[in-house]
């Protein structure tokens, strides 16, 4: 709060964009203007304008200016010449919004290793002060006569504030100084109306370390994800990239790969959504020669990386160290004393904070060492001394040293304590899904589809983060032609996405059109664009791609089976499965032939009528039955219609046969079943999923009981041993499961 002292209006221009986008294009400052006002007298006591010469991209028009560090020093001397101490708490800068200092002056000074005076770290935002002051006046003066104007809206520019206050804009000849003079007019009106500047802003120049627990509540509107960081970047380097914006305590969390190494990403938590929004405007700004991508993230993302779950880590990190160093490659039997000797001997010795208590070894859940350790140091000056021992040896092993963070300590310890499970060469499940989602089972390709019909498409070049919904969006109008559970993601032997997918379409025409229209089209994923290769293929092509010609039992890749939630039972290899089905089909065809042989027309004339049999003597009956048996044995069986090699080509049509008409001399007293084979349902089909001969479930299982004794036994004796009756029951024909494409 300022009730006396001095305020200084500061105006900043860059070589790029202005207004709300000021500083978002990473252009250098080319103009600075200052107006110093004495608060007690409400008078302007000094003005200065400076042309700043760019150094990264020199401009011919600004060769008369001075570098930024010279301008800063000249203004400091000018303020002192006014008998004003700029480092006094009563001296404050006032800017038009947040960008002049947060997005321009502090980031540029940091990139040029320029140390700004301390008064640049505290300022007032004239827009916030204006809204606070005149909103307060409108509320308190509601009963006044005449009533004050209504409270102002959040101003979009200086002109909005001038119009509300009834102040004429600056109309002088100095175009560049117009904005800073308008700011000075607004500040003077605020002081004249009896208000004080009561909303100070600060710029945090030092990143504070802190401990985050998984049970903490995090505002998801304050998190960003920075991608493309140099692998050796520390939390301090990331804080410098966001210099000018206030990062929350312990708000930098470096992300690690599954192997425990930094993957070039970090999650950053800011103190407010306003600072997060300004951080997003630094998308594709640079650290050295690398540009950094900045995206929104959630509070859950931050807690998953920075949240700690162990008391050991909390106790270790609460010792107040300013520097944390990670050691990697330690001998498994290393002791704390060896670590202390490693840093305290040789050139530039450095002492570990709290001795052995400042060393934390990382161990697995079973107590075994991982070869990593974290070491604490008390002062920032200890960091270069400790890191100078990078790749020095302990015993016969060289040690790698990296500057670490509290979030990395939490993350490494959390991972080390997770339950380790052995992984087979072909994983049975995908990586753990997000909460609320069912686990995805991975199955070999031949269980899903096979065959030569080109009714599938193959997608290659997908982003690793792509999900089914992204594929459906990419396929657009062709998504309606996908069969149920027809999108199959391909995973490698480690259970990670391979960037490929296979899609089952409802026809070959749909697959052809999809491949023609979508090949080399772009898939938009977040702010990235990837062109996708789309090929038409068959189930057999899919098998060759996934297995490389080996059997699926040793396949290096597996598929997600659409929306299945549990893996299907293991199935034999396709060739063995085909052989088994072919063998069963031949057995079934032999059963079929035997059945038809027992019903062929030549058998019927030798059968006497029921009345004739009853009228004959027992001796005549004994003579005719052996004769009938001999005739049955002379019958020729129907030829097998499919050989073993042709069992995989079920394309030949069943030959039509004439329905057999009952001879007129047959007595209807003996009712034999009559088949019209050409018009009845097929007895065996590769696609049958119900018991065979299901339409003939009324067949008699034995000859009529009125026949003479010995008639049925003689007929049965003439048949093979596998048939106990000339009219077999349904149990003779097993049910065959359905295997698509075989």
Image (tube, rainbow, N blue to C red):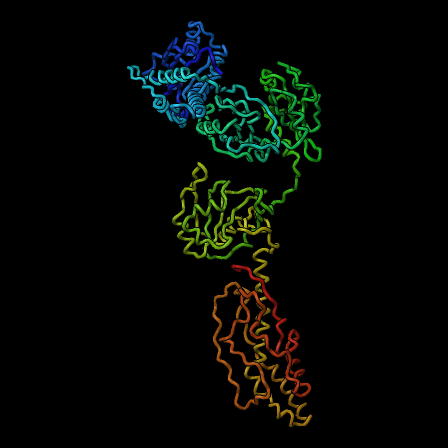
- Position in image of residue 719 (x %, y %): 63, 78
Q: What residue is rendered at 60% in x and 66% in y? A: 735
| Location of residue 249 (image quadrant) | top right
Seen in the picture, residue 49 relative to 521 is either above or below; the reply is above
- Direction from residue 61 to residue 497 in the image, left or right: right
| Location of residue 151 (image quadrant) | top left
Q: What residue is rendered at 49% in x and 31% in y? A: 227
Closer-to-camera residue (282/371): 282
Closer-to-camera residue (145/477): 145
Seen in the picture, residue 729 relative to 427 is either above or below; the reply is below
- Direction from residue 221 to residue 66 in the image, left or right: left
- Direction from residue 712 to residue 738 in the image, left or right: left
Q: Is residue 463 visible?
A: yes
Closer-to-camera residue (255/312): 312
Q: Is residue 30 visible?
A: no
Q: What residue is rendered at 42% in x and 5% in y? A: 82
- Position in image of residue 111 (x %, y %): 46, 19
Seen in the picture, residue 74 relative to 154 is either above or below; the reply is above
- Position in image of residue 134 (x %, y %): 42, 23
- Position in image of residue 522 (x %, y %): 41, 42
Count of number-bearing discs? 0
């Amino acid at each position: 709060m300022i009730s006396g002292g001095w305020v200084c209006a500061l105006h900043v221009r860059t070589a790029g964009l202005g207004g709300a986008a000021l500083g978002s294009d990473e252009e250098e400052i080319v103009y600075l203007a200052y107006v110093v006002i004495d608060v007690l007298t409400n008078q302007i006591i000094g003005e200065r304008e400076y042309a700043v010469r760019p150094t990264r991209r020199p401009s011919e028009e600004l060769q008369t200016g001075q570098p930024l560090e010279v301008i800063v020093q000249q203004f400091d001397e000018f303020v002192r010449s006014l008998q004003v101490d700029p480092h006094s708490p009563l001296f404050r800068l006032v800017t038009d919004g947040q960008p002049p200092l947060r997005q321009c002056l502090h980031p540029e000074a940091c990139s040029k290793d320029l140390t700004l005076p301390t008064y640049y770290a505290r300022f007032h935002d004239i827009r916030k002060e204006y809204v606070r002051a005149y909103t307060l006046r409108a509320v308190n003066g509601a009963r006044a006569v005449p009533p004050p104007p209504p409270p102002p809206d959040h101003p979009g520019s200086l002109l909005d504030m001038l119009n509300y206050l009834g102040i004429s804009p600056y109309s002088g000849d100095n175009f560049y100084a117009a904005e800073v003079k308008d700011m000075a007019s607004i500040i003077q009106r605020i002081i004249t109306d009896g208000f004080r500047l009561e909303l100070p802003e600060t710029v945090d120049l030092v990143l504070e370390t802190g401990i985050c627990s998984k049970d903490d509540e995090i505002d998801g509107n304050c998190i960003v994800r920075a991608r493309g960081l140099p692998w050796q970047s520390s939390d301090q380097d990331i804080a410098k990239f966001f210099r000018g914006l206030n990062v929350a305590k312990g708000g930098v969390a470096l992300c690690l790969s599954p192997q425990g190494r930094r993957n070039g990403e970090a999650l950053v938590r800011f103190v407010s959504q306003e600072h997060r929004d300004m951080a997003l405007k630094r998308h594709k700004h640079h650290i050295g020669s690398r540009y950094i991508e900045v995206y929104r993230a959630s509070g859950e993302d931050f807690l998953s990386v920075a949240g700690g779950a162990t008391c050991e880590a909390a106790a270790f990190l609460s010792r107040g160290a300013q520097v944390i160093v990670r050691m990697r490659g330690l001998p498994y039997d290393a002791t704390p004393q060896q670590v202390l000797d490693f840093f305290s001997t040789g050139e530039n010795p450095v002492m570990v904070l709290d001795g052995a208590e400042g060393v934390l070894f990382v161990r697995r859940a079973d107590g075994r060492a991982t070869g990593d350790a974290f070491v604490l140091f008390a002062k920032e000056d200890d960091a270069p001394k400790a890191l100078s021992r990078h790749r020095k040896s302990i015993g016969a092993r060289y040690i790698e040293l990296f500057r670490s963070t509290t979030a990395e300590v939490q993350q490494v310890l959390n991972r080390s304590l997770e339950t380790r499970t052995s992984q087979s060469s072909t994983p049975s499940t995908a990586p753990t899904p997000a909460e609320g989602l069912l686990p995805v089972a991975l199955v070999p390709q031949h269980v899903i589809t096979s065959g030569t019909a080109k009714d599938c498409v193959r997608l290659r070049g997908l982003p690793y983060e792509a999900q089914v919904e992204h594929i459906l969006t990419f396929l657009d109008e062709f998504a309606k032609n996908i069969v149920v559970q027809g999108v199959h993601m391909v995973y490698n032997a480690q259970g990670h996405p391979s960037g490929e997918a296979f899609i089952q379409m409802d026809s070959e025409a749909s697959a052809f059109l999809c491949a023609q229209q979508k090949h080399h089209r772009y898939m938009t994923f977040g702010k990235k664009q990837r062109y996708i290769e789309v090929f038409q293929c068959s189930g057999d092509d899919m098998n060759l791609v996934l297995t490389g010609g080996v059997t699926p039992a040793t396949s290096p890749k597996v598929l997600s089976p659409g929306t299945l939630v549990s893996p299907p039972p293991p199935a034999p290899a396709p060739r063995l499965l085909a052989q088994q089905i072919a063998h069963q089909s031949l057995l079934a065809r032999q059963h079929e032939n035997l059945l038809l042989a027992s019903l062929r027309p030549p058998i019927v004339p030798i059968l006497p009528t029921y009345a004739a049999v009853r009228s004959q003597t027992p001796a005549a009956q004994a003579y005719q039955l052996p004769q009938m048996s001999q005739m049955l044995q002379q019958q020729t069986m129907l030829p097998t219609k499919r050989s073993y090699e042709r069992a995989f080509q079920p394309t030949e049509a069943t030959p039509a046969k004439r329905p057999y008409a009952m001879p007129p001399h047959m007595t209807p007293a003996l009712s034999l079943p009559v088949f019209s084979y050409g018009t009845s349902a097929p007895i065996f089909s590769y696609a049958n999923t119900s018991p065979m001969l299901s339409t003939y479930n009324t067949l008699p299982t034995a000859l009529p009981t009125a026949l003479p004794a010995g008639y049925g036994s003689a007929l049965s004796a003439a048949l093979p041993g596998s048939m106990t009756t000339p009219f077999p029951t349904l149990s003779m024909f097993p049910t065959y499961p359905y295997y698509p494409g075989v």
